[in-house]
Image: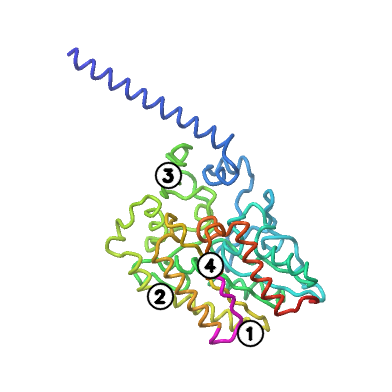
Amino acid sequence: MIATRRTVRRTLLVGAALVVALLLAEVAARVWLHCLADPPAFERYASIDQLRGRLGDFARFRAHRQLGFALVPGYLRDGNRHNALGFRGEEITLAKPAATLRVVCCGGSTTYGEGTAHDYRLSVPFLLQEGLRAGGHTVEVINAGCPGWTTLETLINFETRLLELQPEFAVVYHGINDVLPRLVWPTSAYRADWSGWLVREQHVVEASLLERSTLARILLIDAGRVEPHGSLLRIIGDVPPSSLTFAFRGQRLAGSYPSGVFRDVPIERLLEQNPPVFFERNLRSLLAVAAAHGVQVVLCTFAYSREFPERDYIGHPTVQAAIDGTNAIVRRLAGEIGVPLLDLAPELTGKELFTDGVHFTAAGNRRRAELLQRWFVGRLGRTGR
């Protein structure tokens, strides 16, 4: 009887100590988040209520009738901004100013400049514009990129929003975002509208009871078990059962790949059975629409670094091979249709140019802008329009 009481007492003491330790860890996590975390870390780990409390209207994205989602017009946070027309950067008029050359840069987060999201002036389109203006060109370079967009959104965006800006040139830069929608199973879910990959509608996913703990939320996000509360998927979009992209990322982050469905259907099989036919179709359609309206498309290959082997998507060699495959399509289309090609992939590979193997650092953006500027100067001449 005495031994039983001692066992119960020890169990209660251990349990109480564990509760106290967890409470102290929770307090420490909250103090770190609110007082010590830098802005990117706060935005990654804060809850929806915490984001609203500090940032107000924190969302950069909203639902869009044709595009599924797009940038919030008029967004302003520190050095980042979206103009009234919903493009990242400074205000422009819908009507093109007289004697001004307009260039639209099309793509996803790597065009938007997600690696330097704190300052729009570090993005490639802005740097290209400043470099060309310094050379005497009267030019507006418009950042028409949006994180998460594929060639499908770029095609729709070009038709519905960019043509009315009357651009002379469209720089197109796509790659990994057209690889990820191919990670769907069964293959019948691989459709041109990407409906088997992501369902898009306006909503905000509130936190589960466990996620209301700051400590648990940090651990869950780092393990890839939940999305940051300010991420695109928490604000706009749901993942249907056929979509395996985010399960793949979660397993990569947790070091458990391949497990679950991937034991029977590894990504090698997914990518083989879901070939990049829609990527090529969308590019062909974009090129045809642009030609019909007198816009010169400049196709770019997609650059990435192999020096991030631990990263979720880009670190996997099969994903890298898939991007190489999309780049081969870009090169082939440029030669077949006769449009300019900027082969950026072999030029931009160093680890110092990237934050994660895909998104560029400030140095990477400058280098990419320099390569674009060199092409435009060669095409336009060193002075004048």
Disc nearer the start of the sequence (3/4) = 3
Q: Name the residue under label 3.
A: 220
- Residue, x 43% and y 42% (percent of image)? 219
* Crowd class of label 3 (few under 14; some 14 to 19; many from 20; radius 10 Å): some
Q: Are marks 2 and 1 in contact (CB under 8 Å)?
A: no
Q: Distance between the residues labelled 2 and 3?
A: 33 Å
Q: Which mark is residue 275?
A: 2
Quarter holding the C terminus is bottom right
Residues in magenta? 335-345
Task: Please tell me whether residue 136 belongs to the stretch shown in magenta.
Answer: no
Q: Are marks 4 and 2 in contact (CB under 8 Å)?
A: no
- Residue, x 82% and y 75% (percent of image)? 98
Please tell me whether mark 2 sits on a helix, a strand or a loop. Answer: loop
Mark 3 is on which residue type?
Leu
Quarter holding the N terminus is top left
Q: How far apart are marks 2 and 1 (CA)?
A: 26 Å
Q: How far apart are marks 4 and 1 (CA)?
A: 26 Å
Q: Which of 366 and 62 is in front in this view?
A: 366
